[in-house]
Every structure is written in structure tokens, then in C-alpha cells.
């Protein structure tokens, strides 16, 4: 697909992706050493892909595809693509492609038998695989059939175009963006691999992933390698990351990433002078200032003051403390009858 997409649209897509990745420093963990890995967001990737290639977003309901693209060929025919979008690190392992929570009950019996068989194998991976060979094959078959049914259903409910099996040439692909590792020169690798139904006639069991979790196993259909994890009912696929790279984009990080967000905010909400006080209080002449002793432990309540110990007093204690304060400082502060102790939370005016 990538080689057939219009050059100007690919350039626009690259600009959108690199622009987002250039803001990485705004999201990077400051306590980690080395050059941060370029940041990429899957939802942003979907939006950028749709905008650049005039794609239709298909990620609705339980669809297996994220986007669909229709390209007009010089001879007038339409070239159609169904696209699964992915973003993950270039050094990442297998990626989730499906989940079967609603179908789990169809193979709970098989999982139980696999687990019981493994208990007799003394932790030997070879024995576990031999004991469960046919059970793994049966389970892989059921998982693959459901996976393929989801793909067929998604094709029947496309928004971007309808399919005519006799006339249309439709290609299904995974389009992936793979940021470089932390510490490496910042890059985003563009990759592509086939997105096909699982070939149920060619399933080969590779065995359990670890002896202590015998119900987790991997298999291949000759084109892709898959892994099923029973705890979360998820199917993963190996993307052979480095082998599917088509392009590598150099990424530069802006020095003041947060400043970019300030400029966006200014353009949307209007510019605000730095240091402007949003809450303006009535101006008054300040002749003296006082410091209240504050507790390092914040008290409960949105407006609870942090006056040390004061809020925990009963009403008599608070009244007595205010009287002591009043008597001690009456000759030093102006009209105490109008003085309000902000941190104490109420007026010092004598009660009638």
C-alpha cells in the first residue's frame, strides 16, 4: 500500500506525525536519563492518517479495521485498501490484535484439560507440548475461526466503500509507526505487513510460552506467528518489527515544547499577560503584616485553612484563642473589629 499512496499525501502525513513527535519533551519522564523515545499517540495517528490520505475511519463498534482508502487509478479503476493502524516501539514484542472475552466459554473445557495435563509433566515444556498437542491445535482452530469471522463481518459493514468480490481488488494491510528506543537518535520507523485471515488449513503449533502458564501458547499459519493468552483472552501477533521497515523519519525535539502549548492556548483563548492575578481582591493600604504558624499536614475540606491546631478546637477554645489574639495585638493593629483572619476562616468581630 505505502508505495502506491500519493507522494504529496505521504509528505503531509509525515509532517503531521513529525510535528506531534517533536513535542516529546513535554511528555518525557524527567527522571529518566538519555534521549527520550519519540512519543506517538494511537488516536492521533488515526486522525493524521485519515486527514492526510482522505481515509474513512472504520474503527467503530467491533470492526477489525481502523481505516479504509480508495485511490483512483489512471485507468479509472478504484484501488481499495483496508488498514489496521498500529504504533509501538521498534524494540517491542508481540502486539495485541484481538480479544475474545465473549467467546471464552467455548473453550473453557479445553483450557481445563490443558492445565490438568501440564500438572503431570513436572514443569517440562517438551512434555507439556506433547501432552497437549491436539488440544492446542483444537483451540487454535477455534480462535482462528472466530478471528476470521470478525474480519468478514468488518468487511461487510465498511463505511468507506462497498465491496464487489467479482470486480474489486482489495488489499488489507497493517500500517505501523515504530518510535526508536530511548537513548537512540530519535526516529520513527514506518512499516507495513499483510493483514490477512488466519489460514486455518495451515496451522502449526509452536507450543506453550512458559511451563507455569501452559494455557498460553503460540502457533503459526505459515505467514504470521500468533500467541494466545488465556487470562485475558487476547490474541497477539509478531510484526517482525525491523523486517517490515519501509522508511525512517528523523525527529527533532523543540527546545520549549510547553511554549508551543502556550501559543496554542493564546490563539484559542486569547493572550494572557504572564503573572496576571486572576483573582483580584479589593485594594487596601498595608501598614503591617503578620505570619500565622501553619501545619505541614493539610486538613480536610476544600476550603479548610491550615492554621495549626485551630480548626480542631471546640467553639469555646476558638473563642478564647481569638480573645487572646485580640487582647495581645489590639494596640498594634488598627480596627480589629473589621479585621478578618484569612487563615482562621472567620471574623474576629466580637459576638454580641
Image (cartoon, grey):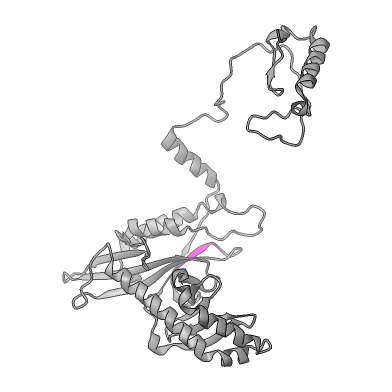
Q: Residue at x 24, y 65 (%)?
A: 161
Whether residue 319 is visible to the viewer of this picture, yes or no, is: yes
Q: Residue at x 59, y 58 (%)?
A: 36
The quarter of the displayed image where residue 8 is located = bottom left
Task: Give the camera-side residue of 282 and 216.
Answer: 216
Q: Residue at x 51, y 83 (%)?
A: 110
Assign the N terminus to one quadrant of the image.
Answer: bottom left
Q: What percent of the width, then of the height, locates residue 207?
A: 55, 86
Q: In this view, does 119 lie to the left or right of 12?
A: right
Task: Give the camera-side residue of 115 and 13.
Answer: 115
Q: Is residue 125 left or right of residue 177?
A: right
- Please state the extent of the stretch shown in magenta in the rendering: 185-191
Whether residue 6 is visible to the viewer of this picture, yes or no, is: no
Q: What percent of the width, then of the height, locates residue 289?
A: 74, 17
Magenta stretch: includes residue 187: yes
Among all residues in the image, which is located at the extreme left?
A: 76
Task: Give the camera-side residue of 113 and 94.
Answer: 113
Q: Is residue 21 left or right of residue 338?
A: left
| Above or below: residue 203 compared with residue 234 | below
Assign the C terminus to one quadrant of the image.
Answer: top right
Amino acid at each position: 500500500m505505502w508505495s502506491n499512496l500519493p507522494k504529496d499525501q505521504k509528505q503531509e502525513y509525515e509532517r503531521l506525525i513529525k510535528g506531534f513527535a517533536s513535542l516529546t519533551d513535554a511528555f518525557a519522564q524527567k527522571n529518566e536519563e538519555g534521549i527520550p523515545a519519540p512519543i506517538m499517540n494511537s488516536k492521533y495517528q488515526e486522525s493524521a492518517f485519515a486527514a492526510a490520505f482522505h481515509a474513512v475511519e472504520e474503527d467503530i463498534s467491533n470492526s477489525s479495521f481502523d481505516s479504509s482508502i480508495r485511490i483512483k487509478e489512471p485507468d479509472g479503476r478504484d484501488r481499495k485498501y483496508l488498514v489496521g493502524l498500529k504504533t509501538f516501539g521498534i524494540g517491542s514484542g508481540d502486539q495485541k490484535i484481538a480479544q475474545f472475552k465473549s467467546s471464552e466459554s467455548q473453550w473453557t473445557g479445553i483450557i481445563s484439560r490443558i492445565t490438568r495435563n501440564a500438572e503431570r509433566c513436572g514443569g517440562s515444556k517438551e512434555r507439556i507440548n506433547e501432552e497437549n498437542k491436539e488440544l492446542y491445535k483444537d483451540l487454535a482452530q477455534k480462535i482462528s475461526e472466530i478471528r476470521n469471522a470478525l474480519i468478514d463481518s468488518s468487511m461487510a459493514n465498511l463505511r468507506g466503500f462497498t465491496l464487489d468480490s467479482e470486480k474489486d481488488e482489495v488489499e488489507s494491510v497493517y500500517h505501523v509507526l515504530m518510535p526508536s528506543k530511548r537513548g537512540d537518535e530519535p526516529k520513527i520507523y514506518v512499516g507495513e505487513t499483510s493483514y490477512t485471515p488466519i489460514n486455518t488449513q495451515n496451522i502449526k503449533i509452536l507450543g506453550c510460552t512458559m511451563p507455569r502458564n501452559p494455557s498460553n501458547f503460540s502457533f503459526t499459519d505459515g505467514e504470521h506467528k500468533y500467541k494466545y493468552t488465556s487470562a485475558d483472552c487476547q490474541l497477539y501477533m509478531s510484526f517482525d518489527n525491523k523486517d517490515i521497515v519501509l522508511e525512517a523519519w528523523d525527529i527533532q525535539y523543540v527546545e520549549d515544547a510547553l511554549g508551543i502549548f502556550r501559543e496554542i492556548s493564546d490563539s484559542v483563548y486569547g493572550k494572557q499577560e504572564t503573572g496576571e492575578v486572576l483573582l483580584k481582591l479589593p485594594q487596601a493600604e498595608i501598614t503591617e503584616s503578620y505570619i500565622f504558624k501553619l501545619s505541614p499536614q493539610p486538613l480536610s475540606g476544600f476550603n479548610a485553612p491550615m492554621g495549626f491546631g485551630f480548626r480542631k478546637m471546640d467553639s469555646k477554645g476558638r473563642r478564647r484563642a481569638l480573645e487572646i489574639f485580640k487582647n495581645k495585638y489590639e494596640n498594634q493593629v488598627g480596627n480589629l473589629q473589621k479585621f478578618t483572619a484569612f487563615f482562621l476562616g472567620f471574623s474576629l468581630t466580637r459576638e454580641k
